[in-house]
């Protein structure tokens, strides 16, 4: 099932930024650490024999082994020059929000008795991260771990204990199959079955009725479909809308029906292209080592390997061109732009 959750959206943005897209990644507001569940919230009995009450140390260890490892391993590849750049501030600003909010948010949920920890899944998750980063992060394609809960074990490490109709502040606090609807900052929402088309979904709206930003990071543990099968949660209206069928135009894979992805501008049962395959944007290409080489904007191009440091490139935007393994920089004085390394990219 597709999980349309905030942390997945943030990390999806980071994939775009880490792979040197010319699109500027939007800064993320840090979650309010005071936005914790009420300590006296009622929790149902734990019916999962493999899960036990989550302990602060184990939760901190989970966060350090996952989001902390992504941040720290990648940061270790960066030079003083990298850290002085706008691109570093944007990329690592977002990574830091996720890393730093993980432990306090999970511990707040645990203190309220709303989550349990699965030791076997936790071990599998942390082992997978340790194996992936054993040789460091420099120059690696990080896309296999940026969606943490696609890593073996991580999705099941934290189990929600809140039953149907119980209060929640994050999806992962609800039992599997349920979603948290109507939460807003310190105010709880309610665990409910995945809503049908037309019903409210996800976070509540801001004061005045406008679509508000999610007040907390939801770390996507467990399976919590935002909407019923055949529907997806519109982030602007906070309402479930019909998912798009195959061949319908799209801008994001979350808009498409389960099993489909947004490729070449429409929902498709295909997969991102290998080198030489057709593309219209970088997300049409498989992994972060490829980019979409276009002859002109709006045309169909081919997926090609990113260029190493020293290769000529076309500068585009504050983050640099998307054709480089690092970033594209145009020196002062009108000299031709060329690729330069960024945080160990080569």
Image (cartoon, grey):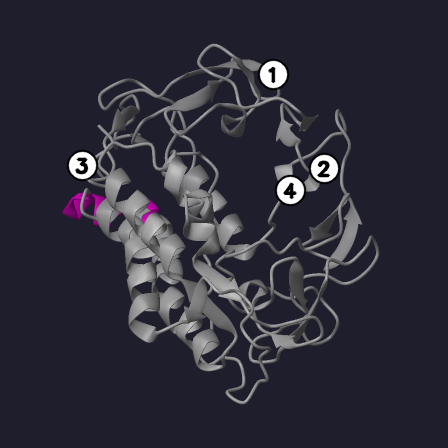
Which residue is situated farthest in the right direction here? 198
Q: Are marks 4 and 1 in contact (CB under 8 Å)?
A: no
Name the element at disc 4. Answer: helix
81 magenta-colored: yes
Placement of 273 over or under 151, stated as above or below: above
Q: Which residue is mark 3?
A: 135
Comparing labels 4 and 1, the label whose residue is closer to the camera:
4
Quick check: can you spot residue 92? no
Contact check, label 1 and label 3, Cβ < 8 Å:
no
The residue at the point 21 percent across, 35 percent down is 344
Tell me the number on the disc at residue 254. Answer: 4
Residue positioned 44% across, 76% down in the render: 110
For disc 1, the neighbor class at 10 Å (few under 14, some 14 to 19, many from 20) is: few
Alpha-carbon span between mark 1 and mark 3: 39 Å
Q: Residue furthest bottom?
A: 40
Left or right of residue 312: residue 346: left
SS of the residue at dot 1?
loop
Q: Circle 2 sits in a helix, a strand or a loop, which is it?
A: loop
Q: Quadrant of residue 45?
A: bottom right
Residue at (25% x, 40% y) in the render = 131
Would you name the residue on which mark 1 appears? 299
**Earlier residue among tags 4 and 1:** 4
Residue at 29% across / 26% down in the picture? 334
Name the residue tied to disc 2: 257
State the SS at label 3: loop
Mark closest to the chain's N terminus, 1 or 3:
3
Q: Nearer the viewer, residue 159 or 103?
A: 159
Q: Main secondary structure of the magenta part?
A: helix
> Considering only order in the chain, which callout, 2 or 1, is on the residue closer to the N terminus?
2
Q: Residues within 10 Å of mark 2 (few under 14, many from 20)?
A: many
């Amino acid at each position: 099932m597709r999980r349309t959750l905030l942390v997945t959206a943030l990390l999806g943005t980071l994939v775009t930024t880490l792979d040197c897209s010319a699109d500027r990644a939007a800064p993320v507001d840090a979650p309010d650490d005071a936005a914790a569940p009420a300590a006296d919230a009622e929790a149902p009995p734990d019916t999962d024999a493999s899960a036990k009450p989550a302990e602060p140390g184990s939760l901190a260890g989970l966060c350090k082994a996952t989001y902390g490892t992504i941040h720290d391993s990648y940061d270790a590849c960066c030079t003083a020059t990298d850290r002085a750049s706008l691109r570093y501030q944007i990329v690592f600003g977002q990574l830091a929000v996720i890393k730093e909010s993980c432990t306090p948010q999970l511990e707040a949920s645990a203190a309220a008795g709303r989550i349990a920890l699965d030791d076997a899944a936790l071990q599998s998750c942390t082992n997978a991260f340790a194996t992936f980063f054993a040789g460091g992060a420099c120059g690696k394609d990080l896309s296999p771990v940026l969606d943490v809960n696609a890593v073996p074990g991580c999705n099941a490490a934290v189990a929600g204990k809140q039953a149907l109709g119980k209060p929640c502040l994050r999806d992962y606090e609800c039992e599997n199959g349920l979603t948290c609807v109507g939460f807003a900052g310190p105010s709880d929402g309610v665990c409910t079955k995945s809503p049908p088309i037309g019903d409210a979904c996800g976070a509540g709206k801001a004061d005045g009725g406008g679509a508000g930003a999610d007040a907390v990071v939801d770390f996507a543990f467990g399976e919590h479909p935002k909407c019923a099968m055949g529907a997806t949660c519109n982030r602007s209206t906070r309402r479930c809308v019909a998912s798009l069928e195959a061949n319908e135009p799209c801008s994001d894979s979350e808009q498409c029906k389960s099993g489909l992805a947004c490729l070449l501008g429409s929902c498709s049962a295909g997969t991102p292209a290998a080198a030489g395959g057709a593309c219209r944007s970088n997300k049409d290409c498989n992994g972060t080592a490829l980019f979409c080489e276009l002859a002109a904007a709006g045309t169909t191009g081919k997926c090609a390997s990113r260029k190493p440091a020293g290769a000529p490139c076309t500068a585009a935007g504050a983050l640099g061109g998307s054709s480089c393994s690092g970033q594209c920089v145009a020196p002062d004085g009108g000299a031709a732009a060329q690729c330069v390394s960024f945080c160990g990219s080569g």
